[in-house]
Amino acid sequence: MKTKTIFLIAALACQICFAYSQEPIRLWTNSVPGALGTSEKDIPTLTPYLPPKEKATGAAIVICPGGGYGMLANHEGEAYARWLNQYGIAGLVLKYRLGSQGYRHPVMLQDAARAVRLTRFMSNQWGIDPGKIGIMGSSAGGHLASTLLTHFDMGNPGALDPVDRLSSRPDFGILCYPVITMGNATHEGSRFNLLGPNPTQELINDLSNEKQVTSNTPPCFIWHTWEDTVVKVENSIEFGRALNNARVPFELHIYEKGPHGMGLGNNHPWTSDLIFWLKQRNIIPSGK
C-alpha cells in the first residue's frame, strides 16, 4: 500500500510542471473509473489557471462549463478562469464526461468530486488555501456544481489513492443561470443527457438538488435573469428557497435583462456583485 501511495503522489507531482502553463492534467493518473474507452472524451481533466504569485489570494474555484451535459462551453470555462485570475483567484476548469458521449449519472458527479479533491491535494504546490476552494457552474454546469454542493462526501481515510482520502465538499458555490431541478421546471436536454430516457422517480428526486439541501450545504452565490427562456428562473428561486429553509447563507440575484448562456456578459453587474460577495465572506481580501 505504501509503495502504491508513493507512486501516485509522484505521478501527480510530475504533472505540476504543466499546471503553470495552463495545460490540462488528468483527474486520475491511471485508469479512469467508469470509462467507456481511452480516447480524449473518456479522460476527464482539470486545467489550472493560476494567478501570479504576488497577486494570489489563496482562493480557488473549480469551474464546470455549461452545455446541457452534451458539450462544454469555453466561454463559461477558460473565460471565467482568466477573469477570476484578475482578482487573485485560481480558476480550475473541469472537463467532465458527457451524456452525448455515452455517460450518465453518477459519472459527472464523480468527475466534479475528484476535481475538488485533486485541488485540495495540490493546494500547497498551487498556492491555494485548502479551506477556500469553491465550485462554480453555468446552466448544466450549474446543475453539476449544485449536485456536488448537495452530494459531497468527506473522503475515504483508508483509500489507496491519497487524493480519495480528501473531502469533496466545496467551501462555497457559485451558480450562474443554473439547472437545479430534474422535475417540472427542468431543462429537458440536460435531464436526458444526465439521466437517460427513462429515469426512475427516485433518481429524478435525488438529482433535483433543491430537494437535497441540508444545513451542511456550503454558502452560495446564485444569479439568473428574468429574460432567460432556456432554463427557467424557478430553478434558482427554488434553490435559494431551500437554502433559506436550511439556514444556509446565500445571495440570490434575479436580473431582468440578459439571455441564457451569456457568461461574463460584457460587464453585466453579476460579476461585480460576485466579487463583492467573495469579499464579504472573506474569501478574498477587500482590497483585491
Image (cartoon, rainbow, N blue to C red):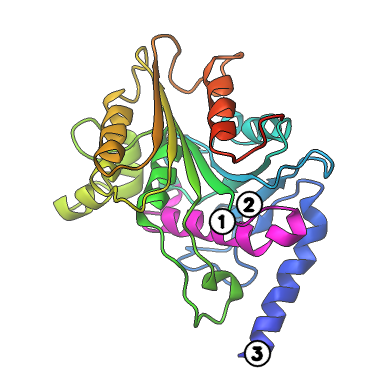
User: What residue range appears in magenta?
Assistant: 101-130
Which residue is found at the position 63% from the left and 52% from the top?
46
Toward the viewer: 214 or 247? 247
Residues at marks 1 and 2 touching, judged by CB atoms closer than 8 Å: yes
| Crowding near the residue tagged with mark 2, few <14, some 14–19, many ≥20 C-alpha atoms within 10 Å | many
Q: Amino acid at mark 3?
A: Lys
Q: CA distance from mark 2 to mark 3?
A: 26 Å
Q: Earlier in the sequence, mark 1 or mark 2?
A: 2
Q: CA distance from mark 1 to mark 2?
A: 7 Å
Determine which residue is flagged by label 3. 2
In the rendered image, the quadrant that contains the C terminus is top right
Left or right side of 175 for 15: right
| Crowding near the residue tagged with mark 1, few <14, some 14–19, many ≥20 C-alpha atoms within 10 Å | many
Left or right side of 140 for 23: right
Tell me, yes or no, whether the highlighted magenta stretch contains residue 235. no
Q: Amino acid at mark 2?
A: Leu
Q: CA distance from mark 3 to mark 1?
A: 23 Å
Determine which residue is flagged by label 2. 46
**Could you say whether the residue bearing mark 3 is in a helix, strand or loop?**
helix
x and y, in percent, of residue 114 in the image: 53, 60
Quarter where residue 260 is shown: top left
Residues at marks 3 and 1 touching, judged by CB atoms closer than 8 Å: no
Q: Could you say which disc has been placed on residue 62 in the image?
A: none
Q: Earlier in the sequence, mark 2 or mark 3?
A: 3
Q: Could you say which disc has been placed on residue 115 in the image?
A: 1
59 lies above or below 125:
above
| Crowding near the residue tagged with mark 3, few <14, some 14–19, many ≥20 C-alpha atoms within 10 Å | few
